Image: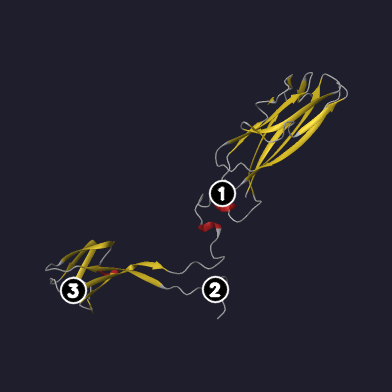
């Protein structure tokens, strides 16, 4: 037989069953509430009972009332006809986005098994010139700084920084790097270095780092710079940027 769309799968249904410990009474409590007696099938001593107030039993909510009392030697169970447990999964491709609740799929689930997927991007810019005479790395700018929180400890953070560097002294070196919190992601000379041969020579530098922080906490990535001597400057003539990308592991 031909079908339009997904071919229906065989759906086997398992009904909930309640077994009772009987006694000399007509009143019992059901495990699940029902609208009326037609929503359960009652079996006493392996005989199916007829539902209804003029017959063997009635039911409402969790109350089951028999027309005649049982004894302690009777066996009795109820099958909940309206409470079925499906034992077959939906066929592949049968669920669309309209069937999913908003926010039901987390970024961690999106990342599962999809290494390299871009999950989020944060960026910051700075137009103000920053200077330092420090020969050890210092923060270039509080605004050339981004905070990002990985959704999984297996994810990576790819960071790119772009800005210019300068120094007011000839024949000296100026260095730049990226810190993750208090950790320098470069070596002792950072991730980028320029040698100044002319004090008017403003050099644009761009550098990047693929970080594996193994964390799901908020992380701060920030530009730092230093010089071998003289006064180094950052963003002297152009806007600086720093951008962090979360990549699924």
Left or right of 113 in this view: 12: left
Q: Residue furthest bottom?
A: 1
Q: Give the distance between the C-alpha atoms of the residues marked 2 and 3, in whole angstroms.
A: 42 Å
Left or right of 77 in this view: 210: right
- Give the residue displayed 50% in from the left and 73% down from the top: 9
Q: Residues within 10 Å of mark 3 (few under 14, many from 20)?
A: some
* Of the image marks 2 and 1, the number of the one nearer the N terminus: 2
Q: Are marks 2 and 1 in contact (CB under 8 Å)?
A: no
Q: Are marks 2 and 3 in contact (CB under 8 Å)?
A: no
Horizontal and vertical percent for residue 244? 66, 39
Horizontal and vertical percent for residue 24? 11, 69
Q: Give the distance between the C-alpha atoms of the residues marked 2 and 1, in whole angstroms.
A: 31 Å
Q: Residues within 10 Å of mark 1 (few under 14, many from 20)?
A: some
Q: Is residue 155 above or below residue 6?
A: above
- Give the residue displayed 20% in from the left and 74% down from the top: 75
Please indicate, yes or no, whether residue 107 appears anywhere in the rendered image: yes
* Circle 3 residue: 56
Q: Give the distance between the C-alpha atoms of the residues marked 1 and 3, in whole angstroms.
A: 55 Å
Horizontal and vertical percent for residue 215? 57, 42
Q: Secondary structure at mark 3?
A: loop
Q: Are marks 1 and 3 in contact (CB under 8 Å)?
A: no
* Circle 2 residue: 7
Q: Which mark is residue 177?
A: none
* Circle 1 residue: 107
Quarter of the image for residue 31 reads bottom left
């Amino acid at each position: 037989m031909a079908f339009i769309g997904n071919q229906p799968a065989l759906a086997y249904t398992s009904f909930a069953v309640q077994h009772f410990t009987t006694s000399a009474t007509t009143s019992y409590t059901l495990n699940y509430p029902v609208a009326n007696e037609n929503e359960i099938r009652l079996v006493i001593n392996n005989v199916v009972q007829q539902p209804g107030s003029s017959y063997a039993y009635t039911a409402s909510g969790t109350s089951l009332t028999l027309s005649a009392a049982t004894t302690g030697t009777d066996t009795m169970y109820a099958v909940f006809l309206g409470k079925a447990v499906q034992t077959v999964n939906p066929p592949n491709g049968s669920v669309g986005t309209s069937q999913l609740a908003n926010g039901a799929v987390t970024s961690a689930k999106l990342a599962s098994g999809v290494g390299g997927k871009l999950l989020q991007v944060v960026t910051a810019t700075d137009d103000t010139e920053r200077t330092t005479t420090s020969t050890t790395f210092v923060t270039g700018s509080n605004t050339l700084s981004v905070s990002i929180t990985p959704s999984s400890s297996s994810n990576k953070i790819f960071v790119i920084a772009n800005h210019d560097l300068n120094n007011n002294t000839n024949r000296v070196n100026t260095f730049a790097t990226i810190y993750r919190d208090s950790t320098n992601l470069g070596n002792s000379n950072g991730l980028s270095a320029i040698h100044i041969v002319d004090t008017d020579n403003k050099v644009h530098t761009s550098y990047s780092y693929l970080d594996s922080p193994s964390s799901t906490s908020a992380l701060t990535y920030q530009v730092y710079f230093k010089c071998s001597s003289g006064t180094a400057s950052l963003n002297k003539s152009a806007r600086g940027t720093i951008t962090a990308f979360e990549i699924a592991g």
